[in-house]
């Protein structure tokens, strides 16, 4: 490992130490801290998020999209989540002023369906839809896997073999700011790059697509992130 990468990894690991992650933290993977910013690249204020709205940011790589959601109520942690290869972990719950904000990888754990600039087949649904009687779920229209964002993205329906990977957020109450610092659970990044690497490189600047995003990453409302959202 290059010295620069080693220092970044050590810095990220130290950042996790103060987050009081629950049991199963061995499934946590630290990355260099990235502050979430608004469309003007100013630190995003957590209290500015609208409850029930889909927001997207790229992390920990420029090519890997994540959901940022304010679920509008205090979200407690979830216990006994399990990756597809059988590793158990607990999820620490929501953050922010009302502990209502959560973040997850937007890469479906079944067939890697994910939002792109052109179209998204996966998103948070605040209300029931044609193909689901459930509300307040992340619904992947590709194979109708559904995940509970209030319970660590636990699988509720469909063929998905594991929860969506959680994005661990650090909240600074004195500034009302959020930073992404780690993933928790079964991240799909290696398989994702193997499956879509050529397209991702074209869309996100070549090798840059597979390197950590850096000190900040921009948050966009889904409406401003992709041109078409498939409803199901």
Image (cartoon, rainbow, N blue to C red):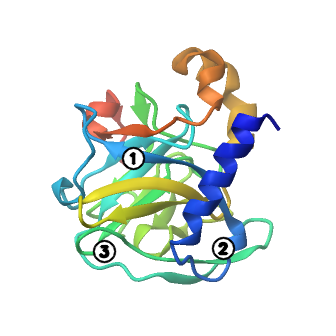
Q: Crowding at label 2, few (<14), some or many (≥20) Cα neighbours within 10 Å?
A: some
Using the image, determine if residue 77 lies above or below residue 111.
Answer: below
In terms of depth relative to the viewer, which is nearer, 82 or 182? Answer: 182
Residue at 48% x, 57% y: name it: 104
Residue at 79% x, 73% y: name it: 86
Q: Circle 3 — which element?
A: loop
Q: Earlier in the sequence, mark 1 or mark 3?
A: 1
Residue at 50% x, 67% y: name it: 153
Can you tell which mark lies on residue 99? 3
Q: Earlier in the sequence, mark 3 or mark 2?
A: 2
Q: Earlier in the sequence, mark 1 or mark 2?
A: 2
Can you tell which mark lies on residue 35? 1
Could you tell whether 144 is left or right of 216 in the image?
right
Using the image, determine if residue 47 lies above or below residue 87.
Answer: above
The residue to which callout 2 is attached is: 25
Q: Nearer the viewer, mark 1 or mark 2?
A: 1
Tell me where residue 61 appears, x and y as whole percent: 57, 37
Can you tell which mark lies on residue 1? none
* Pointer 3 with pointer 2, Cβ within 8 A: no
């Amino acid at each position: 490992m290059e010295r620069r990468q080693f220092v970044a990894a050590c810095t990220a690991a130290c950042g996790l130490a103060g987050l009081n992650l629950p049991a199963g933290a061995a499934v946590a993977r630290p990355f260099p801290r990235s502050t979430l910013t608004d469309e003007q690249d100013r630190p995003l204020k957590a209290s500015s998020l609208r409850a029930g709205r889909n927001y997207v940011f790229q992390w920990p790589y420029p090519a890997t999209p994540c959901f940022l959601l304010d679920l509008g109520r205090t979200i407690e942690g979830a216990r006994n989540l399990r990756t597809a290869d059988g590793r158990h972990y607990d999820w620490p719950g929501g953050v922010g002023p009302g502990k209502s904000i959560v973040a997850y990888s937007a890469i479906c754990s079944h067939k890697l369906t994910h939002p792109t600039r052109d179209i998204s087949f996966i998103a948070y649904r605040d209300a029931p839809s044609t193909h689901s009687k459930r509300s307040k779920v992340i619904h992947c229209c590709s194979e109708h896997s559904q995940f509970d964002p209030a319970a660590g993205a636990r699988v509720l329906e469909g063929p998905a073999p594991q929860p969506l990977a959680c994005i661990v957020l650090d909240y600074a109450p004195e500034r009302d700011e959020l930073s992404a610092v780690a993933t928790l659970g079964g991240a799909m990044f290696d398989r994702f790059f193997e499956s879509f690497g050529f397209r991702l490189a074209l869309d996100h600047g070549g090798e840059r697509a597979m390197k950590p995003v850096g000190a900040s990453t921009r948050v966009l409302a889904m409406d401003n992130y992709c041109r078409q959202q498939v409803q199901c």
